[in-house]
Amino acid sequence: MPADEIVTHSSEETIAKGREIASKLRPPVLVLLKGDLGSGKTTLTKGIISGLGAAKEEDVTSPTFNLVHEFRIHNGAGSEMSSHPCKVYHVDLYRIENFHDLESLGLEDALSEKAIVIIEWPERFTFRTDWPTIEIRLDHAGGDSRRIATSGLIRVNELS
Ligand SMILES: Nc1ncnc2c1ncn2[C@@H]1O[C@H](COP(=O)(O)OP(=O)(O)O)[C@@H](O)[C@H]1O
Ligand SMILES: [Mg+2]
């Protein structure tokens, strides 16, 4: 198994991993989440966004219809990030058909301020950005097991 892979065995474990990843994120950063339907991209995002103190786990849901959900890290939220308020975007490009649709999402605005931008199905488009980028790949590994592999800034198995 490559050095930057772990396997989780429940959605709770994946959420916990998301919280660990959150503790390492500093804006601006682009987090690309790749993997099939049901591989756990939204579940991992629950952990990341709740870990950032931007929302409760249950308030992080799949952006299936609006395609972009916007959160804000508030001052005094109790997270490590609380002294640096910023926006957190959760984007799902699964239903994006063309470049016009993509433009209508207003992602350029998101990418023009120092934010944390989490994108499901990023392979739908090529992102040209000079932002630090973390790529996380999730795969079914039988039953409730999911293989989570990272590349970029964070090695998922070095999180503590
Ligand atoms: N180890 C695991 N990690 C993440 N999700 C899991 C795991 N085991 C089972 N699941 C379930 O798999 C589904 C993952 O769905 P979701 O996170 O929406 O995937 P995606 O966003 O990649 O389509 C959820 O129903 C979740 O409860
Ligand atoms: Mg999803």
Image: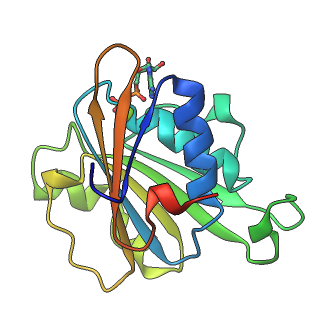
| Rendering coords of residue 20 (x, y %) | 62, 53
Q: Is residue 125 toward the left or the right of residue 28 in the image? A: left
Nearest the viewer among 129 and 109 is 129
Residue 2 against residue 25 in the figure, above or below? above
| Rendering coords of residue 24 (x, y %) | 60, 68
Residue 97 against residue 109 in the figure, above or below? above
On the image, which quarter does residue 139 sit in?
A: top left
Q: Is residue 65 visible?
A: no
- Scheme of colours in the image: rainbow
Residue 43 against residue 93 in the figure, above or below? above
Nearest the viewer among 86 and 51 is 51
Residue in the picture at 9% in, 51% down: 98
Q: Quadrant of the C terminus?
A: bottom right
Q: Quadrant of ligand 1?
A: top left
| Rendering coords of residue 52 (x, y %) | 68, 56
Q: Is residue 127 toward the left or the right of residue 118 in the image? A: left
| Rendering coords of residue 74 (x, y %) | 79, 63
On the image, which quarter does residue 56 sit in?
A: top right
Residue in the picture at 90% in, 64% down: 76
Q: Is residue 46 visible?
A: yes
Residue in the picture at 52% in, 35% down: 14
Q: Is residue 131 toward the left or the right of residue 100 in the image? A: right
